[in-house]
Amino acid sequence: MGTPWTNWARTASANPHRVERPASRDELAEVVAGASAVRPRGSGHSFTAIAAAPGVAVDLVDWTGVTEVAGTLVTVRSGTTLRQLNALLDALGLALPNLGDIDAQTVSGAISTGTHGTGARLGGLATQVAALELVLADGTVTRCSPEQDPDLFAAARVGLGALGVISTITLRCVPAFVLHARESPARLDAVLEEFDHLTATEDHVEFHWFPHADRVILKRNNRTGEPAAPLSAARRFYEYEVVENGAFGLVCRLARAVPATTRALNRVCGALVSERVYRDVSHRVFVTPRRVRFVETEYAVPRAALHDVLRELRAVVPRLDHGVIVPVEVRVAGADDIWLSTAHERDTAYVAVHQYLGMPYRRYFDAFERIANSVGGRPHWGKMHSLTADTLRERYPRFDDFRRVRDRLDPTRKFANDHLARVLG
């Protein structure tokens, strides 16, 4: 029987007719073939209703683990979470070359929605995919790669779950490496002035801007041949659990309870940022625990437009009729060739705006969307936005090619839901 489902941010819900938990490829194929409407369900970390299942929900929690290792090519079952995958790769002496800061997603959900980290010479997680195996609408299993059905490969790496249910993913990994992490307070104008230089000389750069002040947390992570020198267990617990989750969660709850304090609290948080320098294995640097719930929209904008976007956003925030407690996050990525990748054929800056769960956000998000849309911004497929297929078609040169592949593989729209109808037509 189906059970009610709600995503992590509580912005989407569904009540499928039933939930299936296949534990083998054959079981997965049988479920897909026998359903008239089916959606794969990941970990619920998309802020949209992309995973909402109107009919059968496929929960891949029992379809996990590594199936094959060939040098640095690792094939993994689609229900494996990034947290599980990082541990498995670490045991093999391998790692993913780039990651975002949340590891709760399934690897298939992460690539299907365009999850990314930061690095001007690197792409999102989907650019690390060497091959995919999918279960199609009729239950047949097909494989795609640059050599085998390259159009499907170009479409399915960021496929939104619209083409089939991913069964396995082959990833290009790298030998395990250590990152030298430097996190420090800075001023927004100073960071923007040197941002092009930073992104050209540092492996991974991002910053978190407190929007009611000019203060930021600047994060620079670089590969190093030195041994790991991680934060002590006590320091890590204090920094991440006590400060970033416990204390910040308390501040957010205070802002929600007493909205008039929000702007001042945001400025205080920015002023209290301290420096943190350490070395650790890559995934322990990339990933940080996120227990404070929020809502989020993120747009990919041309790198050259970043300064204009932030200048406009700085002008908008003081005019809002409510404060913003959660910082704005800015990251970068290199151009890629994936049809629905937000970095398709252009070097990209990502600007993500957030608000604590239960606090007003609509006017803030709408204002940011207008700014991002004015420069041809592409919304993250897993985060809140208002665009429809007609507008998205103008932003993606291969949008119609993607829809042609979809028509070929799923003409009856077995994998559709209301959200996909809006963004794909």
Image: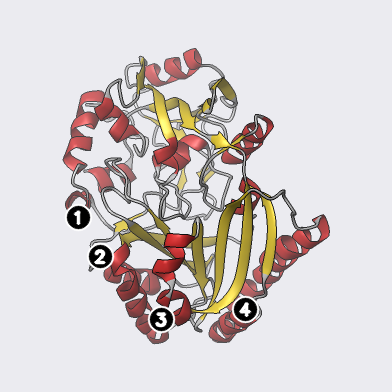
Mark 2, residue position: 373
Q: Tell me the element at label 4.
A: helix
Question: What is the distance, in whole Å, between disc 4 and disc 3 at their CAs?
Answer: 17 Å
**For mark 3, does the 10 Å Cα neighbourhood hold few (<14), some (14 to 19), or many (20 or more) residues?**
some
Residue 52 visible in the snapshot? no
Image quadrant assignment for residue 274: bottom right
**Residue shown at the point (44%, 62%) measured from the top left:** 199
Residue 117 visible in the snapshot? yes
Question: What is the distance, in whole Å, between disc 3 and disc 1 at their CAs?
Answer: 26 Å
Q: Which mark is residue 391?
A: 1
Work out whether mark 4 precedes mark 3 in sequence or the reverse, and give the earlier one: 4
Mark 4, residue position: 269
Q: Position of residue 205 (x, y in %)?
A: 50, 61
Work out whether mark 2 precedes mark 3 in sequence or the reverse, and give the earlier one: 3
Q: Is residue 375 above or below residue 121?
A: below
Q: Tell me the element at label 2.
A: helix
Mark 3, residue position: 317
Dot in front, 4 or 3:
4
